[in-house]
Amino acid sequence: MNDRYARGLARQAELRGADERREVYDLLADTAPDLSRLAVEFAYGNVHARDGLDAARRELVILGALVALGDTRPQLRAHTSAALAAGLRPGEIVEAVMQAVPYAGFPRVFTAMTAVREVFADRGLLPVTAGRTGPCPPP
């Protein structure tokens, strides 16, 4: 096991817990074990381990990127869990996803919010009230 991989595993366990991390990567063990290893080494052992942002801000950035990419439901679920573990409140996560509407569009935001809602439901965190509850003021 190289240093980046060990650092990546430690970072994932810190953010998600060892069991949840294994669940994601065990799915690839018999098909593409190198893909799993590369993801752990690069994303978590190199990029995620950098200084400069605290865990909560880092997860907000990641959530925004995943919303914009679209078709990232498993990753959105994992990073919603990581955002909660980093101390973000459900309302803050909802608001971060909402902020993507002008840039990513309604379909991607609705899809992302569905994944976020699943995590909240699994954890008994519904209902969530975030930000403005009425109509937006005119420009």
Image (spheres, rainbow, N blue to C red):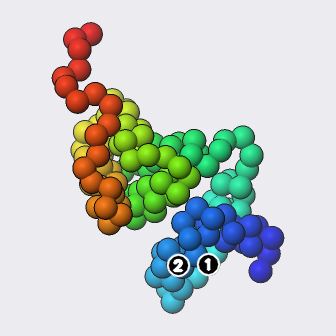
Instruction: Measuring from the top left, give residue 37's x and y in whole percent.
Output: 64, 75
The residue closer to the viewer here, 14 or 65, is 14
The residue closer to the viewer here, 103 or 6, is 6
* Residue kind at label 2, given as amino acid type: Asp
* In-image side of 80 versus 5 (left or right): left
* In-image side of 3 versus 86 (left or right): right
Q: Quadrant of residue 73?
A: bottom left
Secondary element at image label 1: helix
Vertical placement of 36 versus 124: above or below?
A: below
Q: Residue at x 51, y 83 (%)?
A: 26
Q: How many marks?
A: 2
Name the residue at the right extreme.
Answer: 3
Q: Residue at x 23, y 20 (%)?
A: 136
Instruction: Measuring from the top left, give residue 95's x and y in whole percent.
Output: 37, 37
Say which quadrant the C terminus sits in.
top left
Which comes sooner in the sequence, label 2 or label 1?
A: 2
Pointer 1: residues within 10 angstroms few (<14), some, or many (20+)? few
* Residue kind at label 1, given as amino acid type: Asp
Name the residue at the left extreme.
Answer: 135
Q: Residue at x 65, y 44 (%)?
A: 54
Query: Badge 1 is on which residue?
Result: 34
The residue closer to the viewer here, 67 or 21, is 21
Query: Badge 2 is on which residue?
Result: 19
Q: Residue at x 31, y 61 (%)?
A: 124
Tell me, yes or no, if residue 28 can be seen here: no
Secondary element at image label 2: helix
Vertical placement of 16 versus 2: above or below?
A: above
* In-image side of 98 versus 39 (left or right): left
For the residues labelled 2 and 1, the Cα–Cα distance comes to 20 Å
